[in-house]
Image (cartoon, rainbow, N blue to C red):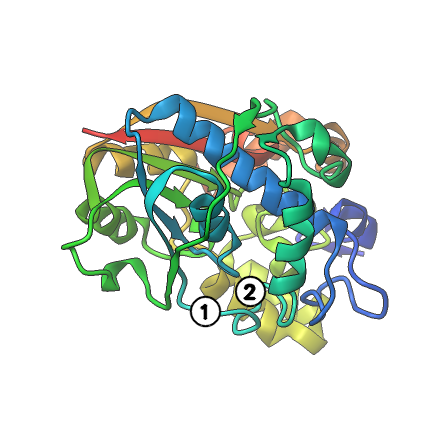
Amino acid sequence: MYFKNFSVKKKNLIPFLTPTSKGTNWYDSPPSNKITKRQIGRIILQFHQVASAIKEFTNNSKIDFLDIGTGNGLLPFLVSKYLNCNSSTGIDPYEDGEHQTSWPIGTKNRLKSEIKKILEKKVLDIQNYKHLISHEAISFEPKKINLYKKKSNWIFLKKFVHEIKNKKKYNFIFAKSIDHIPNWKNLFLNVSKISSKNATLFIKHNSFFSYNGAHRYASTFIPWGHVILKEKEYESYAKKIHPKRYKEMVNFYYNGLSYPRNTLDDLFDILSKNNWKIIHLEQSNKKKYLEQIKLAGGVKKLLNDTKKNFSNISLSELISDRIIIIAKKI
């Protein structure tokens, strides 16, 4: 099957998705009350990366930590329990199960229990949980971190960033969900307002322009179809190829993903205009990116097809998995 001269095949997408739970479709959200080793490893790795960044890039003996898009709140919980911090806060407009991308209901306490088992030792070492993150593409392994062990004291705010009062200032801000937040100009304007002098901003980014940047909910059977197709073409594709879930697919494409679309260069420009200086950039690539490029017809064709819609897109961003950006408030 072809659409706008592009080959449409399930094998262009399904093999590159993380497996779903038994009894669910490839485009379904994870079921309630079930946890996986992948979820456990993902949270620990994220905590380890944050802990490493706090150690390497801050001069503060104690941290006022903010997690934007905290989801189930396990990251601010872990920061408050195992790191030296004054305060730890997680914000998210949605609680478990309230959004398509939210953590499943009934999993938080079980995840917390499994994670605690791995963090029982006084040192956080990737070798202790490496078996849980075989699916993760990481370019650099975080270094060993000495852990505190104390009573957890953190808060959850069911808010958007712009709803936080400016009286509270944070000196370490983590944001892993900007791929779901619209209007980055307003986002980072408000982040700057609640950041203290010399604050550290840690962004863990899943680019819209990556192979699975539309997530399983809005991805196509065309390699990089969500990037290559113009918006009206994407709507026509969804209606023709996925008629039973056409409305949900198009809704996520516009409302579940950052819109308007911004490349890395756009993001760097926005950060600069809001007084953030980038001090560290780290990119991991899709493990099968060479295979994906081949499906798209090669590098030259892929860039020609994507640059018709996004002139400043780079091959680097197209093949990315996770991109870590660390910046300092100036």
Please give the label number shown on residue 102.
2
Residue projecting furthest to the front: 150
Sequence-first disc among 2 and 1: 1
212 left or right of 2? left
Q: Residue at x 19, y 33 (%)?
A: 275
Query: Residue drawn 60% across and 38% down?
Result: 45
Which mark identifies residue 94?
Answer: 1
Q: Is residue 192 above or below residue 298?
A: below
Q: Is residue 95 visible?
A: yes
- Location of residue 92 in the rendering, given as x and y in whole percent from the top left corner: 41, 62
Q: Is residue 176 above or below residue 218?
A: above
Residue 232 against residue 16 in the figure, above or below: below
Tell me the amino acid under the disc marked 2.
Ser
Identity of the residue furthest to the left in this view? 167
x and y, in percent, of residue 13 in the image: 75, 50
* Any part of residue 224 in sight: no
Residue drawn at (53%, 27%) of the image: 145
The image quadrant where one finds the C terminus is: top left
Secondary structure state at the residue bearing disc 1: loop
Residue count near mark 2 (Cα–Cα under 10 Å), binned few <14, some 14–19, many ≥20: some
Taking the image as shown, residue 314 lies to the left or right of residue 325, namely right
Element under disc 2:
loop
User: Residue 142: x percent and y percent?
Assistant: 57, 25
The residue depicted at 19 percent of the width and 39 percent of the height is: 196
Q: Residue furthest right?
A: 22
Evaluate if marks 2 and 1 touch, with contact meaning CB atoms under 8 Å apart.
Answer: yes
Q: Quadrant of residue 295?
A: top right
**If the image is split into quadrants, where does the N terminus sit?**
bottom right
